[in-house]
Image: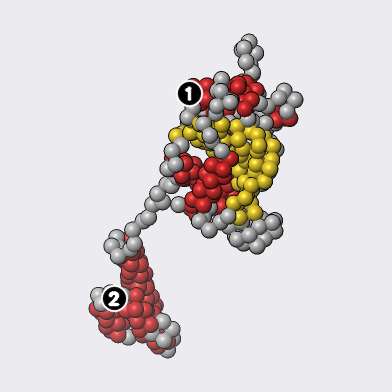
Amino acid sequence: MLDRIEKLRADILEESGNIKSTDLLEQFRIKFLSRKGLLNDLFEEFKTIDKTEKAKVGKSLNDLKNFAQNIFDEKKIQLTKSKEEKKSVTDYTLPGRTYNIGTKHLITQALEEITSIFERIGFKVYDGFEIEDEYHNFDALNTPDYHPSRDMQDTFYLESKGKDKRYLLRTHTSPGQIRVMEQQQPPVRVIVPGKCYRNEAISSRSLAVFHQVEALYVDTNVTFRELKGTLDYFAKEFFGKDLKTRMRPDYFPFTEPSAEVDVECYLCKGKGCRICKYSGWLEILGCGMVDPNVFDIVGYDSEKYTGYAFGMGIERTLMIKHGIPDIRMFYENDIRFLKQFK
Ligand SMILES: [Zn+2]
């Protein structure tokens, strides 16, 4: 029996040299180490041999079993290692990594688009001040002392102790009109885009910071009809060629007469839907003919000149244009939202 053990050892050694894959390793295991393998056959036979030989044969047999088991274990480690090494090799067929390129925020895009629409018809851009004095923000715009918008609850006033004026964060871009008129004689044709501040409770409809674009045109013989034509041009360029506009009378301290402008609902085309609250129209801006009092304040001859002005909120306009349900989404900077406006 000892001879057969030695013969099997030689076989195991020989076959171990051929183990090049996990399949071959498995075959090796079945052939030698499994319950029906050759080693087990010898163990079965071992039970029947003479007692005097048992000690010697038993030791050889156990040595052989350990020998085969060690070969199996070592090969197994080798094979898994080389498999991992293969995995870590660079795969040149994989697609490259993509990087997200930053884009302009949709408010910036809108400001640029609106600016460009008005520049095409001769308007120039004027950058007003975000910190204004009470005079330019209210008084010069014909807004009387008792007007509710002057209330602390609506306006952020700045610490103005020891100063000759009361300062505030501008509540609209309109003071830009006054500053332009103080600096130059007509004709004036400007737009004033920028940030405005109001002491508002934050909700889906209002924020304490928002953007406006203000426009002013002053010359001899400027008529309401020109205002209407300009706004119609703007609405068609910005919202779409096939949409109608309409005007409704309104009141602003610095224009007379004043009007609200509605554009036909882009979604239902005037039929009425949830977005337009079933009216078929969406309010986009306020406008009017500059009040002669304002001309008197800045020293323009109100007998000689007429002019129009209008202003719109950018966030509001974009909410209408894109059906954005909540104004706060503009500033949450959620990539999934911003990505839609590339
Ligand atoms: Zn609608």
Q: Is residue 35 above or below residue 201?
A: below
Disc on res. 231 = none
- Which SS class for mark 1? loop
Give how far across and how far down residue 164 sits, in percent: 62, 12
Query: What secondary structure is marked by label 2?
Result: loop
Whole-number angstrom distance, CA of label 2 to CA of label 1: 94 Å
Which circle, 2 or 1, is nearer the viewer? 1
| Relative to 52, 270 lies left or right | right
The residue closer to the viewer here, 224 or 207, is: 224
Would you identify the image quadrant in which residue 168 lies? top right
Amino acid at pointer 1: Gln
Q: Position of residue 242 (x, y in %)?
A: 53, 58
> Is residue 74 shown above or below 318?
below
Name the foreground residue: 13 vs 274: 274
Q: Estimate the x, y position of residue 324 in percent, counting from the top left.
A: 59, 52
The residue positioned 36% from the left and 56% from the top of the image is 97
Which mark identifies residue 19? 2
- Residue tagged 1: 184
Of the pair 286 and 161, the residue shown nearer to us = 286
Q: Residue at x 35, y 67 (%)?
A: 80
Left or right: 299 as drawn, with respect to 121: right
Look at the image and tell me whether residue 180 can be seen: yes
Q: Residue at x 46, y 37 (%)?
A: 123
Q: Nearer the viewer, residue 165 or 159?
A: 165
Q: Which of disc 1 and disc 2 is earlier in sequence? A: 2
Residue 104 higher or lower than 18, as above or below? above
Quick check: marks 2 and 1 in contact, CB under 8 Å?
Answer: no
- The kind of residue tagged 2 is Ile
Q: Position of residue 240 (x, y in %)?
A: 51, 55
Other-residue count near label 2 (Cα within 10 Å), few / some / many at <14 / 14–19 / ≥20: some
The quarter of the picture where residue 151 lies is top right
The residue most toward the top is 162
